[in-house]
Image (spheres, rainbow, N blue to C red):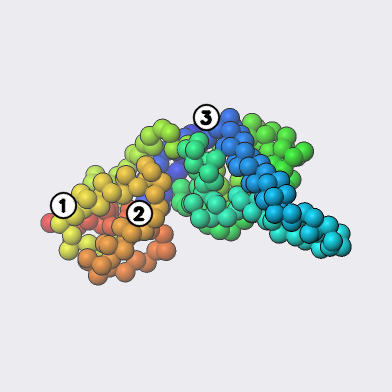
Amino acid sequence: MSELSITTTQNVNINFNTASAGDRMLAYLLDLVIWIAYYIVIFVVIFEVTGFNDYLSEFDPWSQRAVYMFFFLPVMLYTLVLESLMEGQTLGKRIMKIKVIKIDGYQAGFGDYLIRWLFRLIEVTPPFSVVGIICLMVTGKTQRLGDLAAGTAVISLKNDITINHTILKEINDTYIPVYPLVIKLSDNDVRIIKETYEASIRATDFEMISKLQDKVEAVTGIRSVSANATAFIDTILNDYNFYTQRM
């Protein structure tokens, strides 16, 4: 297991433990069990019990293939759909407590999951699985080709994430604050923001950080100049520190 060290735009260092090759392969096997169970239920139990196979036999070969492909779509799209809906996790990944994130520390988007899914065809789907395994073994951050192409990595949520930060410490004299309205916040407000932010980082809960941004904007009247909620909260904490040190 290696460490993925990320420095945000506001000089916050976040250290994640990357998921081991073993954890990633076990997560894949758990997902494989789910696929097999789905196949058995649909194609063996339901098709046989309902007599749907006999009904399909009356179709021409192309129509039969189209029907089978339709029912096989959930297996084909399983990883793409679940990672998009479950913020970087499939059921197997959730059980193994691992998660896909961008290598800049932020949450991956649908485009990133799509790139990873497309690369599965040449490095995960048997008999090409050996390609993915080799990549996991040789890359420094336990990445496969899809991760390298999408700029993602898979991290472990089993261990604590350590955060070494400049928040509420001495701010450089050259620092230029962005949000003067931050002075509307009280010390207790900032303490709650800081604790919520750090807890969300440890849990890689980017949705909570986004909600935190919405709350800060509603209370202070600030409108973010950044589309990234993590960068916004970093700036809020640094700006508050800047102004209170000079009062």
The front one of 65 and 82 is 65
The residue singled out by tag 2 in the image is: 208
Going from N to C along the chain, the mark reached first, 3 or 1, is: 3
Answer above or below: position of 148 versus 84: above
The residue singled out by tag 1 in the image is: 188
From this viewpoint, is residue 28 visible?
no
Q: Which residue is found at the position 35% from the left and 47% from the top? A: 200
The CA distance from mark 3 to mark 2 is 27 Å
Q: Residues within 10 Å of mark 3 (few under 14, many from 20)?
A: some
From this viewpoint, is residue 41 visible?
yes
The three-letter amino acid code for the residue at tag 3 is: Met
Q: Residues within 10 Å of mark 2 (few under 14, many from 20)?
A: some
The CA distance from mark 1 to mark 2 is 19 Å
Going from N to C along the chain, the mark reached first, 3 or 2, is: 3
SS class of the residue under badge 3?
loop
In the image: residue 1, left or right of residue 240: right
The residue singled out by tag 3 in the image is: 1
The three-letter amino acid code for the residue at tag 2 is: Met
